Amino acid sequence: MQQDTKGNIWLGSNSGLIKFSTQTHHIQKFDQRQGLANSEFNSDTSVTLLDGRMVYGSPKGLIFFDPLKIDVQEINETKVAITDVMLVSNDLVIPFSNLDKQTIELSYDDVSPFVRFSTLEYQDQKSTRY
C-alpha cells in the first residue's frame, strides 16, 4: 500500500491496482482492461520512488507508473449518445447520426418507444455503467 503526493492510497490486489481517493472516498480499479500487463499483484511488493513513481510487483514482473499522470476524470466522464429511436406502432425515418439534443415529435398513436444508446467507445466496454 502506497500514498501518492495528492494523498490518494494505492493498493495492489489479486484483481488489479486499486486507487482510493481520500478526498472524495471514490475507488477506481485498474487492471488489464486499462492496459496493465497483469491484474494480479504480490502482497508487500510496492514502493514509491524518489521521483513519485510507484512500483508494484506481480508474477509477470514489475509495474512502474506515475500516479499523477493517470487521468481518472477522463475515464469517468464518458459521454453517452442516443443512436436510434424506434416505435412498435410506426416506422420512424431518422438519419443515422448522434441523436443527442435532437427533437423527435410523436403523435398520440405512437406507442412503445425504444431508444438505443452507446458511449461510442469500444475500449473497456465491460466497465461502462449507464
Image (cartoon, rainbow, N blue to C red):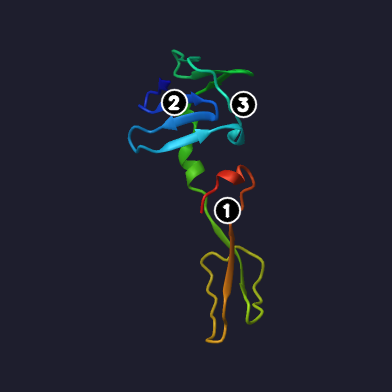
Where does residue 20 sit, x and y in percent of width and height?
A: 40, 32
Image position of 31 (left or right of 49)? right
Q: Nearer the N terminus, badge 3 or badge 1?
A: 3
**Mark 3 vs mark 1, CA separation in Å:** 26 Å
The residue that disc 1 covers is 119
> Which residue appears at 55% of the width and 30% of the height?
15
Residue beneath disc 2:
10
Figure quadrant of residue 102:
bottom right
Around disc 1, counting alpha carbons within 10 Å, would you say few (fewer than 14), some (14 to 19), or many (20 or more)? some
Quick check: 130 above or below 41? below
Looking at the image, which is closer to me, 70 or 110? 110
Neighbours of disc 3 within 10 Å: few (<14), some (14-19), many (20+):
many
The CA span between labels 2 and 3 is 16 Å
Residue most toward the top? 50
Circle 3: residue type? Asn
Relative side of 116 to 74, left or right: right
Amino acid under label 1? Thr
- Residue that numbered label 3 is attached to: 38
Secondary structure of residue under mark 1 = loop
